[in-house]
Image (cartoon, rainbow, N blue to C red):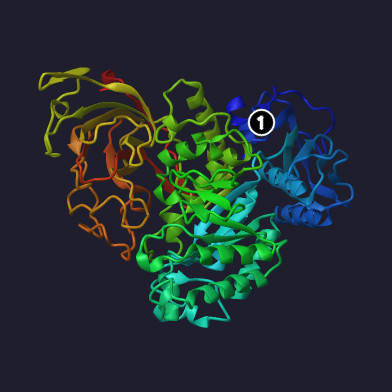
Amino acid sequence: MLDFFKAKVLVYTALLGFCVSGCADSNPENFEDKYPIIPTPQEINYGSDEIQFEHINIQATDFENEGRLLAGFFESKQIKEDTKGLTIELKKSSTENENDEAYSLTISDKIVISATTHKGIYYGIQTLKQIFRKQNKKGVFPKLTLNDWPVFKIRGFMHDTGRNFQSVSQLKEQIEILAQYKYNVFHWHLTDNPGWRLESKIYPELQAEHATTRQKGNFYTQEDFKDILEFCKARNITLIPEFDIPGHTDAFRKALEIDEMRDPKVKPILLDLFQELMDLTSAEDVPYIHMGTDEVRNDFERVSNDVIFEIMNLIRKNNREVIVWKEGIVVKRDSTSINQLWAYHEGRKGHRFIDSRSNYINHLDPFAGMARLYFQQPTRQPKGDSLALGGILAAWPDNNINHERDILIQNPIYPSMVFYADAIWNGRAKDYPEYWAKLPPKGTQEFNDFKAFEKKVITHRDLFFKGKEFQYITQTDKHWKLIGPLNHQGDVETSFPVEESIKDTYNIDGNPYTWTDNHTGGTIHIKHFFGFPAVTEAKQGTYYAYTNIYAPDDRIQDFWVGFQGWSRSGGRRVGPFPDQGDWHTTKPKIWVNNTEIEPPIWKQPNLGTKTDEIPFIDEDYFYRNPTKIHLKKGWNKVLLKIPQDRNSWKWMFTCIPVNITENGVREVPELKYSTKFENN
């Protein structure tokens, strides 16, 4: 792989040794494609053949717990232990590594995972599990050697369960995926305006129904908290609990009948609650306590800095590290807190920080958002140090939901975990803000890098996410021409000559317009809503997008089509919803072979912006029924009209054929894209 990945992948050479219970024939097969590892190991050398085995013989004197874990994995794959089976040795490294999460893995005539710590052995096992295959009732591994270590201390994922409760089982499902991709932090946002979700035995009224505005009666008992903690510990994941105060405290104030956070009763109650939280577990098991302090926007939420500082001191007296959001309340006397950065905010000078900027999953499109997670440089430097601790990927589905699974259905959580895993483990040698909202031009090294990693992701999707919400298919082969912005003079329904005939150039109102032909992806941002570089800097106008799709037969094909990405965020981001008969309020259109494609029949047309309590149902393309489009045999002309006005927040489009299966969304590989006009 390239330096961009921070990996040192060497040319393929044969490893010495013999196969156990038979060996696959040597062949020129690309084992990196067949056995992709995510995150990409720092140093890896694939061999030229594979080993096959019927049984395993685990030797784990130094790491008995991990040995039992590995035995359980093979048992689940119907591979039993036998003294004559393939030897798998979990070995304490003889050389001290300054990184306590480092490990090495060798697969030859036997398998050896070595590390100085239990963490390292655990990560070696995760890698081994990723490359295990089953063939004719035998286990198969590629021969290889690798050395691996993370460049960031904190590699995390955050869920806001204060606004929308998720069951313990659903959280565990996601934590299991985190472990598979070598994350080591689960940040648990436990409180917010709709609910205080962790049981308090001192103040049980916090769980009262009158204080909770969503999913009433749903909260985590203290035993639930300990259960999640033990589940995380078993997977080398540190739990960071967060009580977000003094903002985001509607439920707190309702429960305790407090009008303002400056009420003298507040400080002793908060001190009690933070102490009760810390008394649930040891400082060794939960070394960080997050106290929020962000978005104190209203006068009734404000408290004196003395209150904040006293809570900080209480946390420190309990031998815990304090984490606060930045932007958040700044207490000048505080010299040791860890700043968790969001939006565009920078950390305080001299303070350690965790990076959560520009990686909120609830804002991410399943296609364009993955480019951002791949190309964005965590902490804005190549690797961690004493101040740059790492990053936490965050999920803030602010809007109310109908069912807890909607959080996974309506947000690309699993694809985001996989794409971000590589960046936060390996770091990025360079930041690429120019690709936070779009893919690089075809043929560039950066495009090829992304395409190679995308191929790994697709393999992992098919192997490990069957039946789960993995809203991603190959997009690097979806190409578009664009032309614009054409001046509609405030009328988004204005028609332009592009709709009449397709030509290389146009002269409209005395101005020449030519197509650009370097746009690739399932979703194209014309102008990004956060101002990241996209196609144009214009604030409004009309763009047209063009491509041809080749079909080998006449068919009705499912497509994901959309002209807005509805951030699952406060205020129902993007503004009002369209009326029946429109794709969006900006009046976009799509034609296939000159036939206009009708928009869906919306289940909730014409919703206003401030509808936080009305759950999403079919607003986004990836969780509503696909649009069915007739494709003729041969080349099919696809033309999209994408206007923008000053009333809409996002300017974008999605148009991609999909195959919906019982295992999840999949590619339609027989369909080919071409932007050549002569194909029509």
* Residue closest to the eye, 75 or 480: 480
Q: Amino acid at mark 1?
A: Phe
Residue 482 coordinates in the image, percent (x, y):
28, 27
Element on which disc 1 rests:
helix
Q: Is 374 on the left or on the right of 498, as rendered?
A: right
* Residue closest to the eye, 100 or 51: 100
Q: Is 221 on the left or on the right of 245, as rendered?
A: right
Does the rendering let one see residue 635? no
Residue depicted at 55% across the width and 33% down the height: 453
Q: Is 288 on the left or on the right of 98, as rendered?
A: left
What residue is pinned by disc 1?
A: 31
Residue 25 coordinates in the image, percent (x, y):
74, 29
Q: Quadrant of residue 29?
A: top right
On screen, 24 above or below 296? above
* Residue closest to the eye, 303 or 648: 303
Residue depicted at 61% across the width and 32% down the height: 33
Q: Quadrant of residue 73?
A: bottom right
The quadrant in which the C terminus is found is top left
